[in-house]
Image (spheres, grey):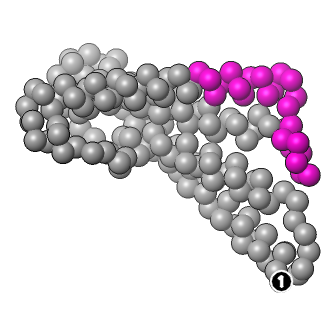
Amino acid sequence: MAMANPLAQRFSAIGGFIRLMDVLSRASAYLAAAMFIAGVLVICQMVFIRYVLGMSTSWQTEFTVFSVTGAMLMGSPYVLMTGGHVAITILPDALGGVARKAMRLVASLIGLAFCGALAFASWVYVVEAYAFNWRTGTVWNPLLWPGLLPMAVGTTLLTLQYVAEILRGET
């Protein structure tokens, strides 16, 4: 994406941050795709074991929940960067001009605040799960923090991507 904001063009650190976030958002999208594919493959394996072999499964459902949920959160910075998120823009589009830019900026600042709070809370949750050796409490009973880590990383990258989009000037 081009850097339309003169501020980003004038200060190389801002432009560098925007480019870094674009690279990180693309990388997280590839990781998200791998996590989603892993979840799908495990579901296929679970179906085969249950319905073809007639055996029970113990870890597949939980793994799939963690991997697909993690994929959604890890892919969200890329979705924001590419404008693929759902937005209702009838009012800003009707207003146009400065009012449109102001509404988009306010919406981005609200999104930034929400994602920042979610990222902070996610990291607190991951650290607590790690420090206290929390487990899921299921039959498989894996450690909880590895399943929570994509949530914290994804929301952090999403927060930083919001900052990049605001600095880019296309909010």
Q: Is residue 12 something that shows in the picture?
A: yes
Q: Is residue 35 magenta?
A: no
- On screen, residue 137 versus residue 41, left or right, reads right
* Residue nearer the viewer, 124 or 30: 124
Q: Position of residue 158 (x, y in %)?
A: 47, 33
Q: Secondary structure beneath disc 1?
A: helix
Magenta segment range?
120-143
Please identify the quadrant where the N terminus is shown: top left
- On screen, residue 89 versus residue 71, left or right, reads left
Specify few, some or many for label 1: CA neighbours under 10 Å numbering under 14, 14-19, or 20 or more.
few
Please identify the quadrant where the C terminus is shown: top left
> Where is mark 1, residue-wise?
52
The amino acid marked with disc number 1 is: Val
Name the residue located 90 percent from the left edge and 80 percent from the top edge. 54
- On screen, residue 17 versus residue 50, left or right, reads left
Q: Position of residue 27 (x, y in %)?
A: 51, 44
Name the residue located 22 percent from the left edge and 43 percent from the top edge. 89
